[in-house]
Amino acid sequence: MNWIHVIANTDNTGCDIPNRLRSHLNHQNMFGWRGINKPIVITICLILCGIVVAFTTNTASIDVLYLLMAVYGITNTGITILLVVWIADVWAKDSGPYMQAFQFTTSLAGIVGPLVVAPYLPSNIGPTDDTTADISAIKWTLSIPYLIIGIITAVNAIPFGLMLAFNSSQLMPTKLIFVMIIMCGSIKALLYGIQEIQLTNITKFSTEVGLTAVSTQYSAYFSTCISGATAASQALAIPLARYIRPLTMLWMGIFLQLLSQILLLFAHKSVCLALVLVLYLEPCGNLWANSPRQLPNRVQTDSKYLDQ
């Protein structure tokens, strides 16, 4: 379990690097940042991301796995940051529904992903099962969906790069936006911490209630339920973002998440209550973390896509 936490933190650290550097590099024009062709960067990131995903299950070295997770975090979140900046740049203060829709599509991927992988997982692995002979078979079958997803990701780099290469716009960061990026990064770090705590809590909870033979397929379906609840909350947030101020949504999300954390203390041995709270906690966290921030409109009149 400790190794899993370290691997997850390596991934999150890689995700944090583009967030921290982009504003400073763009503001200071270090290393020719403003002259970098962003569509080419996105295309390269997609190719690297696809390669990493395709070969994730084929490594037996923990050091190589650290490296793959770090590269995945950098490339995946680098693409996400550029897309979010583009949305904020094009729609400015009206970008709320578009931001929520962007997060909603991400949640849909969270629903589909575990369902795709679940058929390739063993139906049940108990502590007394002799699975030594099946390890290579499981590893090989898991390579199939990972390889397919990796190839699709890499192939999408070509049309995606061509689409973004036609027009350009640029969001020049200000001190206020820099502070907001730091705040958003801190909030996201908090949510990652909560997710890590939930993993250990679910493990302890399963032991206390006697769920010691939970199958890996059940875990995949459980992840789908969490992503489904998140997607539902973000789908609801799309119309709400047009009528509710971002600050109001922020305080609503904080209050609901605090309430769910308090109730979680009483879910000591109640399977139903724990399941409901986990399905409820994740959407609340994403709701207020993804609340739209009103950014100044810096859109050029003849451009819609992010290039420079």
Image (cartoon, rainbow, N blue to C red):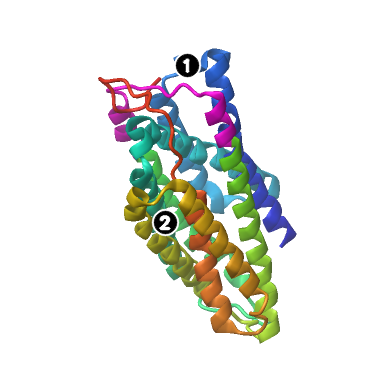
Query: Furthest residue to the left?
Result: 302
232 to the left or right of 175: left
Quarter of the figure with the C terminus? top left
Q: How many marks?
A: 2
* Residue in the picture at 66% in, 79% down: 266
Residue under label 2, please give it. 107
Residue under label 1, please give it. 34
SS for tag 2? helix
Q: Quadrant of residue 237?
A: bottom left
* Residue in the picture at 61% in, 59% down: 195
User: Mark 2: which amino acid?
Assistant: Ser
Q: Quadrant of residue 269?
A: bottom right
Q: What is the span of residues highlighted in magenta in the rendered image? A: 156-181
User: Mark 1: which amino acid?
Assistant: Arg
Mark 1–mark 2 CB contact (< 8 Å)? no
In depth, the one of 44 and 138 nearer the eye is 44
Determine if residue 140 is in view: no
Which badge, 1 or 2, is on the more N-terminal residue?
Answer: 1
* Residue in the picture at 53% in, 54% down: 251
In depth, the one of 102 and 156 nearer the eye is 102
209 to the left or right of 301: right
Crowdedness near tag 1: few (<14), some (14–19) or many (≥20) residues, C-alpha within 10 Å: some
Query: Where does residue 298 sit, x and y in percent of width and height?
Result: 38, 23
Query: Where does residue 148 sit, x and y in percent of width and height?
Result: 39, 52
Query: Where does residue 83 sit, x and y in percent of width and height?
Result: 40, 36
76 to the left or right of 153: right
Q: Quadrant of residue 306?
A: top left
SS for tag 1? helix
260 to the left or right of 293: right
| Distance of label 1 from label 2 (alpha carbons) | 32 Å
